Amino acid sequence: MSTIGSFPVKSVVGGESLIPYFTQVIYLWVPWKTRKQRLERLELERYGREALATGGEMHAVNEAFMAWASRYDTAGMEQRSRVSHEHWLAELPEQIQLIRVEEELDPQQITDQVIRVLHQHE
C-alpha cells in the first residue's frame, strides 16, 4: 500500500473485509483520455516498446487490456467499471465519509483537495 503523507492509498473495491477499518473512502475518476495516457506510459515503462509493438510478446495482451480499460465508463457490473464502483460505494456504511474527486487534476491538486475536505470534517 502506498501513502500520501500519512494517508494510506489503495484500490480496495472487493475488499469488503476491510470496510470496518475505513473512516473515509476516496473515489477518484478522471476522463478516459487521461487514464489512457497514464496506462500507456505505465505499460511502456513496465514492458518496453519492443514487447508492446505489433508482433511483440505483450502486444496482444496489452491490446486486450486497453480495450477492457476503455470500457470503464460504459460497462456494467460484468467488469470493473464506474457502475460497479458506484454500486460498491452505495453499499458503504453511512458513517464512512465518501470523498469524490471527479475532475481532471494533477496529483498535487488531488492531494490538496482531499486534505481540505478531511480538515473540514475534523
Image: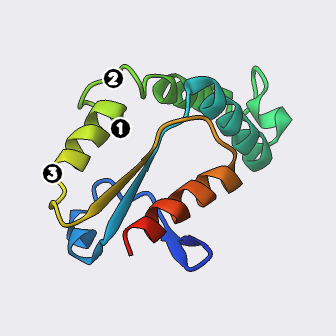
Dot 2 surroundings within 10 Å: few (below 14), some, or many (20 or more)? some
Q: Which residue is mark 3?
A: 91
Q: Which amino acid lies under the numbered mark 2 shown in the image of this protein?
A: Ala
**SS at mark 1 in the image:** loop
Q: Which mark is residue 89?
A: none
User: Disc 3 and disc 1: Cα gap in Å?
Assistant: 16 Å
- Residue drawn at point x = 23 percent, y = 31 percent: 77
Q: Which residue is mark 2?
A: 75
Rendering coords of residue 104 (x, y %): 61, 35
Dot 1 surroundings within 10 Å: few (below 14), some, or many (20 or more)? some
User: Disc 2 and disc 1: Cα gap in Å?
Assistant: 8 Å
Between 11 and 31, the residue placed more toward the observer is 31
Q: Is residue 5 above or below residue 92?
A: below
Q: Considering the image in quadrants, where does the C terminus appear?
A: bottom left
Cβ–Cβ under 8 Å for marks 2 and 1:
yes
Dot 3 surroundings within 10 Å: few (below 14), some, or many (20 or more)? few
Between 98 and 61, the residue placed more toward the observer is 98
Q: Which of the 4 image quarters holds residue 15?
A: bottom left
Q: Which amino acid lies under the numbered mark 3 shown in the image of this protein?
A: Glu
From the viewer's perspective, tell me whether residue 14 is left or right of residue 95.
Answer: right
Tag nearer the camera, 2 or 3:
3
Q: Earlier in the sequence, mark 3 or mark 1?
A: 1
User: Disc 2 and disc 3: Cα gap in Å?
Assistant: 19 Å
Q: Which residue is mark 1?
A: 80
Q: Is residue 25 above or below residue 70?
A: below
